[in-house]
Amino acid sequence: MGAWAQATTTRGAADIDLIQQIKTVVPMVLVMHVSSSVSDEGMRCASRAGVTKINVSARLNVVFAAVVREYLMDNGSVVCPHHYTHAANEAVRPEAGRLLLWYAGQ
Protein backbone atom coordinates (compact mmCIF):
# COMPACT_ATOMS: atom_id res chain seq x y z
CA MET A 1 0.00 0.00 0.00
CA GLY A 2 2.87 2.38 0.49
CA ALA A 3 1.71 3.29 4.01
CA TRP A 4 4.69 1.84 5.84
CA ALA A 5 8.45 2.19 5.93
CA GLN A 6 10.71 -0.28 4.14
CA ALA A 7 11.45 -3.53 6.00
CA THR A 8 14.78 -2.72 7.59
CA THR A 9 16.14 -2.57 11.09
CA THR A 10 15.54 1.20 11.06
CA ARG A 11 12.35 2.19 12.85
CA GLY A 12 9.60 3.68 10.76
CA ALA A 13 6.06 4.67 11.49
CA ALA A 14 2.68 3.47 10.31
CA ASP A 15 0.74 6.16 8.46
CA ILE A 16 -2.34 6.04 10.69
CA ASP A 17 -4.28 8.69 8.75
CA LEU A 18 -3.79 6.77 5.51
CA ILE A 19 -4.83 3.49 7.14
CA GLN A 20 -8.03 5.10 8.43
CA GLN A 21 -8.79 6.58 5.00
CA ILE A 22 -8.24 3.27 3.25
CA LYS A 23 -10.32 1.39 5.84
CA THR A 24 -13.31 3.68 5.20
CA VAL A 25 -13.34 3.05 1.42
CA VAL A 26 -11.97 -0.49 1.06
CA PRO A 27 -14.22 -3.27 2.39
CA MET A 28 -11.33 -5.70 2.84
CA VAL A 29 -8.99 -6.96 5.51
CA LEU A 30 -5.95 -4.68 5.84
CA VAL A 31 -2.62 -6.42 6.42
CA MET A 32 0.65 -4.91 7.67
CA HIS A 33 3.68 -6.66 6.21
CA VAL A 34 6.71 -4.73 7.43
CA SER A 35 6.27 -4.76 11.16
CA SER A 36 10.05 -4.99 11.65
CA SER A 37 10.29 -1.27 10.98
CA VAL A 38 7.32 -0.24 13.13
CA SER A 39 7.39 0.04 16.93
CA ASP A 40 5.03 -1.93 19.15
CA GLU A 41 3.04 1.24 19.75
CA GLY A 42 2.92 1.90 16.00
CA MET A 43 1.51 -1.57 15.44
CA ARG A 44 -1.03 -1.00 18.21
CA CYS A 45 -2.13 2.29 16.57
CA ALA A 46 -2.34 0.61 13.16
CA SER A 47 -4.52 -2.12 14.64
CA ARG A 48 -6.84 0.45 16.21
CA ALA A 49 -6.97 2.33 12.87
CA GLY A 50 -8.20 -0.74 10.99
CA VAL A 51 -5.31 -3.12 10.27
CA THR A 52 -6.70 -6.59 10.93
CA LYS A 53 -3.58 -8.72 10.47
CA ILE A 54 0.03 -7.85 11.29
CA ASN A 55 2.70 -10.17 9.92
CA VAL A 56 5.66 -10.34 12.28
CA SER A 57 7.98 -12.73 10.44
CA ALA A 58 10.24 -9.85 9.37
CA ARG A 59 10.60 -8.79 13.01
CA LEU A 60 11.53 -12.36 13.96
CA ASN A 61 13.94 -12.54 11.00
CA VAL A 62 15.85 -9.54 12.39
CA VAL A 63 16.44 -11.43 15.64
CA PHE A 64 17.31 -14.65 13.79
CA ALA A 65 19.78 -12.95 11.41
CA ALA A 66 21.55 -11.08 14.21
CA VAL A 67 22.22 -14.31 16.10
CA VAL A 68 23.43 -16.11 12.96
CA ARG A 69 25.83 -13.25 12.20
CA GLU A 70 27.18 -13.21 15.75
CA TYR A 71 27.50 -17.00 15.90
CA LEU A 72 29.42 -17.16 12.62
CA MET A 73 31.71 -14.30 13.65
CA ASP A 74 32.53 -16.09 16.91
CA ASN A 75 32.72 -19.57 15.32
CA GLY A 76 34.24 -18.99 11.89
CA SER A 77 35.07 -22.64 11.23
CA VAL A 78 31.49 -23.90 11.70
CA VAL A 79 29.96 -25.10 8.43
CA CYS A 80 26.99 -27.12 9.68
CA PRO A 81 23.87 -24.93 9.72
CA HIS A 82 22.35 -26.92 12.58
CA HIS A 83 24.65 -25.15 15.03
CA TYR A 84 23.81 -21.57 14.12
CA THR A 85 20.15 -22.17 13.27
CA HIS A 86 19.62 -23.79 16.67
CA ALA A 87 21.10 -20.74 18.40
CA ALA A 88 19.02 -18.40 16.22
CA ASN A 89 15.79 -20.34 16.86
CA GLU A 90 16.43 -20.20 20.60
CA ALA A 91 16.79 -16.41 20.35
CA VAL A 92 13.58 -16.03 18.33
CA ARG A 93 11.47 -17.96 20.84
CA PRO A 94 11.29 -15.20 23.53
CA GLU A 95 10.46 -12.48 20.97
CA ALA A 96 7.70 -14.65 19.46
CA GLY A 97 6.31 -15.28 22.94
CA ARG A 98 6.48 -11.58 23.80
CA LEU A 99 4.58 -10.67 20.64
CA LEU A 100 1.93 -13.32 21.26
CA LEU A 101 1.34 -11.98 24.77
CA TRP A 102 1.38 -8.40 23.49
CA TYR A 103 -1.25 -9.15 20.84
CA ALA A 104 -3.34 -10.94 23.44
CA GLY A 105 -3.30 -7.73 25.47
CA GLN A 106 -1.22 -9.04 28.35
Image: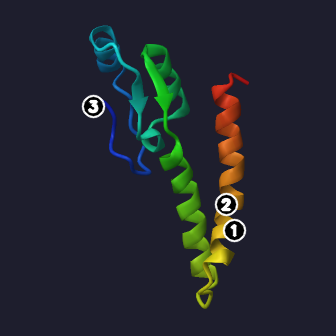
At 63% from the left and 81% from the top, the residue drawn is 74
Q: In the structure shown, which secondary structural element does the residue marked by tag 1 occupy? A: helix
- The numbered dot on residue 31 is none
Number of other residues with Cα within 10 Å of mark 2, as a class: few under 14, some 14 to 19, many 20 or more: some
Along the viewing direction, whichever of 2 and 9 lies nearer the viewer: 2
Q: Residue furthest bottom?
A: 77
Residue 8 position in % (x across, y down): 39, 51
Colour pattern of the rendering: rainbow
Q: In the structure shown, which secondary structural element does the residue marked by tag 2 occupy? A: helix
Q: Residue furthest top?
A: 24
At 49% from the left and 38% from the top, the residue drawn is 55
Is 36 rendered above or below residue 89?
A: above
Total label count? 3
Using residue 66 as the reference point, say whether residue 24 is left or right of it: left
Using residue 3 as the reference point, say whether residue 91 is left or right of it: right
Is 1 rendered above or below residue 72?
A: above
Q: CA distance from mark 2 to mark 1?
A: 5 Å
* Mark closest to the chain's N terminus, 2 or 3: 3
Residue identifier under label 1: 86
- The numbered dot on residue 89 is 2
Residue identifier under label 3: 1
